[in-house]
Image (cartoon, grey):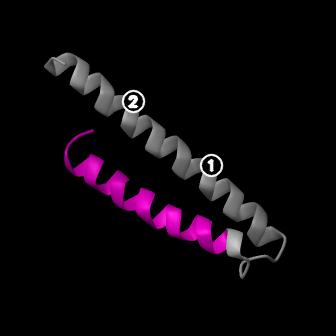
Amino acid sequence: MDDSERLCAYDAFAEDVRREHAEIEAKMDELKAAGKVKSATYRHLFAARITLKDIERRLREHGL
């Protein structure tokens, strides 16, 4: 894999992370509106959101 292919792969990864983060936020908003913030699903999404936020932060720090 050359440098341009690697950069494309990182860009695709960054896009996937941001898309998944947005989807999780939307699902959490739905659950919150339904009063299900104590459900296992909400807690699972909360943990995933924290992980994705950290990955996004690291990507931004590296200019991706």
* Spot occupied by residue 34 in the image (x, y as percentages of width and height): 84, 71
Q: Is residue 54 magenta?
A: yes
Badge 2 is on which residue? 12
At horizontal 42% and vertical 62% (from top left) the residue drawn is 51
Q: Is residue 6 above or below residue 29?
A: above
Quick one: which residue is furthest to the left in this view?
A: 3
Badge 1 is on which residue? 23
- For the residue marked with disc 1, what is the amino acid? Glu
Q: Are marks 2 and 1 in contact (CB under 8 Å)?
A: no
Quarter of the image with the N terminus is top left
Left or right position of 7 against 32: left
At horizontal 38% and vertical 36% (from top left) the residue drawn is 13
Q: Is residue 45 magenta?
A: yes
- For the residue marked with disc 2, what is the amino acid? Ala
Region rendered in magenta? 42-64
Left or right position of 54 against 2: right
Residue placed most toward the observer, 12 or 25: 12
* Spot occupied by residue 56 in the image (x, y as percentages of width and height): 36, 52
